[in-house]
Amino acid sequence: MIETALQKVVGNFSVELPEMNSLEEYVEFIVPKIRPWGEDLRETEFYSVQGGKPWLEVRDDPNFHEAVLHFFNEGGEYLTSVDGNVQRGKWRLLEGTNKMLIELGNKSELYELAFLSNAFFILRKHGNPDRKRKRNYLVMGYEGYIQGLEWRDYVELLFNTYRDKHRTFRTILILVVVIVLIIALFSVR
């Protein structure tokens, strides 16, 4: 009976990722939950390191088969590699904001930080979300961490950031409840 009650309590705290149709839907669901544990763009050591940190782009498009890497190098150098074909550009932060301007060729795009950690880097294109626009997010993961994963596996790893924090909270809560129950039992005697 106690085991069944404990299973019900633990079951109420379990965190499952709901089924969704697109990478963008998952990003919009997960990012608000994990944002408190993310970094800011001014903490460049998370995405820009000496020699370059390769960020592999993730998309849910079934026709997307290219390996697209993004490098945000020191000094504002931006490199993008599509199956080994490299283009140079520039990146810079807009001071006092969590916004990044990326210039590539004759094109400049403004992004806002959605989430950043050692393993995940998600930028949201600035402006009103546009369903006609192909992509509202530039979704990337550290190449050494996500290489070979499908986009749904990436989403699971991203959600694990939340799941792990939630699990820690749940464990602490259960311990506190058990301690309170033990104290209550001994104080009754």
Image: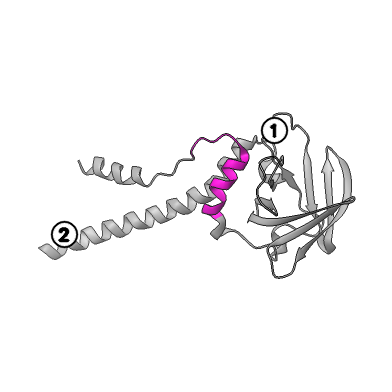
Q: Is residue 132 magenta?
A: no
Q: Is residue 29 magenta?
A: yes
- Magenta residues span 18-34
- Which residue is at the far bottom? 96
Q: Which mark is residue 61?
A: 1
Location of the C terminus (image quadrant): bottom left
Q: Amino acid at mark 1?
A: Asp
Compared with 41, 121 (above or below) is above
Location of the N terminus (image quadrant): top left
Picture coordinates of residue 38, whole percent (x, y): 59, 58
Q: Residues within 10 Å of mark 2 (few under 14, many from 20)?
A: few
Residue 171 or 103: which is nearer the viewer? 103
Q: Earlier in the sequence, mark 1 or mark 2?
A: 1
Q: Amino acid at mark 2?
A: Leu
Q: Which mark is residue 186?
A: none
- Which residue is at the far left? 189
Picture coordinates of residue 14, whole percent (x, y): 40, 44
Residue 79 or 29: which is nearer the viewer? 29
Q: Residue at x 76, y 49 (%)?
A: 54
Q: Secondary structure at mark 1?
A: loop
Residue 20 falls in which quadrant of the image? top right
Residue 150 falls in which quadrant of the image? top right
Q: Is residue 76 visible?
A: yes
Q: Residue at x 84, y 54 (%)?
A: 103
- Dominant secondary structure, magenta: helix
Q: Which mark is residue 185?
A: 2
Q: How is the image coloured?
A: one colour
Residue 100 or 167: which is nearer the viewer? 100
Compared with 121, 23 (above or below) is above
Q: Residue at x 58, y 41 (%)?
A: 25
Q: Residues within 10 Å of mark 1 (few under 14, many from 20)?
A: few
Picture coordinates of residue 66, whole percent (x, y): 78, 35
